[in-house]
C-alpha cells in the first residue's frame, strides 16, 4: 500500500492530510512548526517526523508538498533525490527557470510526479471537457474564467498566481495548444507590486486545434462577492461550470443558433439545462488518481509536462503584469 508524507500543515495542507487519511494512505505529517505537525499527526494517529527523517524512511513511498510556494521546487528535488514519488501543489515553482530545472530533475528520475491542478479532477470539468471533445457545442469560440472573492490577501504572490493556475490548466486542456498571445493588466492596492486584481487575455493560433480561440481570465481577492466560474462558448452551444452553485447545478448547458436574416443576425437559445454529475469531492479524486499512478507507474493527467505548460503561461502573464504595474501611479485602499 502506498504511504504518503504530507509536507505542510497550512489551511490547504490540512485538507490534503484529511483526504489522505480518509483514503487510508497517510503515513506522516511534516511541518517547519513541530507543534503544528504533532497536532495534525495526532489527530490521524500517524508520526510527525522531521523532513530529514521522512526522506530517509523507506516506508514512506511518496510526498505531497503543500509548503509555501517559494519552497516547492527545492522540496520536490529533495523528495525525488530520496526516491519518493511527488505530488506538489500549485504553483509548480517560483518562475519558469526554476520549473524547467525541476523538470530536468524529474526526467532524470524514475519517479511519478504530479502537479496539483485540482479542478482538472472535478466531475463538472471532466463532463464539460468530454462534451467539448465530442463536438457537441461545435468549434470553440471563446472562454471566460473568473475567480473572485473577498479575503486571503497574500503578500508573496499576486491574485493571478494565487487563484488562476487552475483556470489556466483547464483552458489549456480545452484548447489543446499554447497561446500565441498573452496580455495582462492589474492593480496593486494593498502591497506595492503585488496585484490584487488581474485580467489576462490569451489568444490561440488561428490554425490547429484551438482554431483562433480567445480566453479571458479575471482574478481578485478584493471582490464583494464570490465567483468561481468557467464559461465555454462554442458555435452551437455553451457550457457554464459554476463551482459556487450546489452539485446539481454546477454544470449548465445551453444550445444556441445564430441565423442570418434580412434584418441581420438573429441569435436564439434553447432552455438551459443542468448536466447530471457524481457528487464526489475533486480533492478525493485528485489524490486517488495520484495514488493509482504511484501503484501502476502510469503518468498523471497533470504531470510535469502539463505543469510546465501552465508555468509558461503564468510567466508570460507576470511579465505583462509587471510592465503594466510599473507604468501606474501608486494606489491604495483607504
Image (spheres, helix red, strand yellow):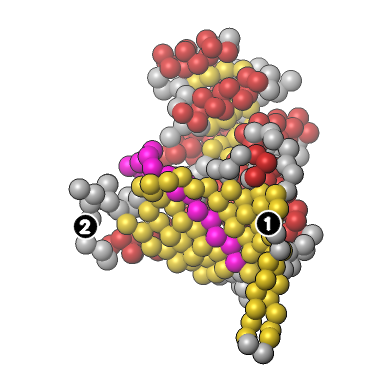
Q: Is residue 231 above or below residue 29?
A: below
The percent position of residue 292, horizontal first and vertical second, equals 74, 32
11, 233: nearer the viewer: 233
Q: Which mark is residue 326?
A: none
Residue 280 lies in the magenta stretch: no
Q: Where on the picture, by quarter, is residue 283?
A: top right
Task: Tell me which residue sits at (67%, 46%) in the image.
Answer: 124
Q: Residues within 10 Å of mark 2 (few under 14, many from 20)?
A: few
Q: Residues within 10 Å of mark 1 (few under 14, many from 20)?
A: few
The percent position of residue 178, horizontal first and vertical second, equals 60, 63
Q: Where on the picture, by quarter, is residue 207?
A: bottom right
Is residue 191 toward the left or the right of residue 66 in the image? left
Residue 208: in sight, yes or no? no
Q: Is residue 17 above or below residue 71?
A: above
Residue linked to disc 1: 272
Task: Tell me which residue sits at (75%, 53%) in the image.
Answer: 130
Residue 159 lies in the magenta stretch: yes
What is the magenta range?
142-163
The percent position of residue 204, horizontal first and vertical second, equals 59, 69
The percent position of residue 4, horizontal first and vertical second, equals 62, 23
Q: Secondary structure at mark 1?
A: loop
Q: Secondary structure at mark 2?
A: loop
Task: Tell me which residue sits at (23%, 55%) in the image.
Answer: 331
Q: Which mark is residue 330?
A: 2
Q: Is residue 188 above or below residue 256?
A: above
Task: Tell me which residue sits at (78%, 33%) in the image.
Answer: 296
> In the rendered image, which quarter contains the N terminus?
top right
Q: Earlier in the sequence, mark 2 or mark 1?
A: 1
Residue 133: in sight, yes or no? yes
- Contact, CB < 8 Å: mark 2 with mark 1? no
Amino acid at each position: 500500500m502506498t504511504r504518503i508524507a504530507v509536507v505542510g500543515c497550512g489551511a490547504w495542507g490540512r485538507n490534503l492530510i484529511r483526504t489522505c487519511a480518509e483514503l487510508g494512505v497517510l503515513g506522516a505529517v511534516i511541518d517547519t512548526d513541530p507543534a503544528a505537525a504533532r497536532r495534525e499527526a495526532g489527530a490521524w494517529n500517524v508520526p510527525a517526523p522531521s523532513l530529514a527523517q521522512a526522506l530517509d524512511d523507506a516506508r514512506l513511498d511518496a510526498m505531497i508538498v503543500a509548503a509555501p510556494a517559494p519552497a516547492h521546487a527545492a522540496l520536490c528535488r529533495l523528495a525525488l533525490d530520496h526516491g519518493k514519488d511527488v505530488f506538489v501543489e500549485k504553483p509548480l515553482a517560483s518562475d519558469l527557470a526554476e520549473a524547467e530545472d525541476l523538470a530536468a530533475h524529474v526526467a532524470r528520475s524514475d519517479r511519478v510526479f504530479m502537479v496539483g491542478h485540482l479542478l482538472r479532477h472535478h466531475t463538472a470539468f471532466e463532463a464539460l471537457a468530454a462534451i467539448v471533445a465530442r463536438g457537441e457545442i461545435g468549434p470553440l469560440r471563446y472562454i471566460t474564467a473568473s475567480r473572485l472573492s473577498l479575503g486571503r490577501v497574500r503578500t508573496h504572490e499576486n491574485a493571478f498566481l494565487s487563484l488562476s493556475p487552475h483556470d489556466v490548466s483547464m483552458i489549456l486542456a480545452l484548447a489543446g495548444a499554447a497561446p500565441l498571445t498573452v496580455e495582462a493588466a492589474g492593480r496593486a492596492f494593498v502591497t506595492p507590486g503585488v496585484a490584487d486584481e488581474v485580467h489576462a487575455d490569451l489568444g490561440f493560433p488561428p490554425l490547429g486545434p484551438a482554431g483562433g480561440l480567445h480566453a479571458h481570465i479575471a482574478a481578485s481577492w478584493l471582490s464583494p462577492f464570490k465567483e468561481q466560474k468557467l464559461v465555454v462558448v462554442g458555435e452551437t452551444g455553451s457550457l457554464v461550470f459554476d463551482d459556487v452553485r450546489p452539485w446539481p447545478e454546477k454544470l449548465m448547458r445551453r444550445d444556441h443558433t445564430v441565423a442570418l436574416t434580412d434584418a441581420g443576425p438573429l441569435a436564439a437559445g434553447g432552455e438551459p439545462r443542468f448536466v447530471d454529475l457524481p457528487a464526489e469531492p475533486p480533492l478525493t479524486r485528485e489524490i486517488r488518481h495520484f495514488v493509482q499512478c504511484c501503484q501502476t507507474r502510469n503518468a498523471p493527467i497533470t504531470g510535469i509536462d502539463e505543469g510546465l505548460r501552465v508555468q509558461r503561461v503564468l510567466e508570460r502573464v507576470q511579465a505583462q503584469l509587471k510592465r503594466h504595474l510599473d507604468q501606474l501611479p501608486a494606489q491604495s485602499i483607504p
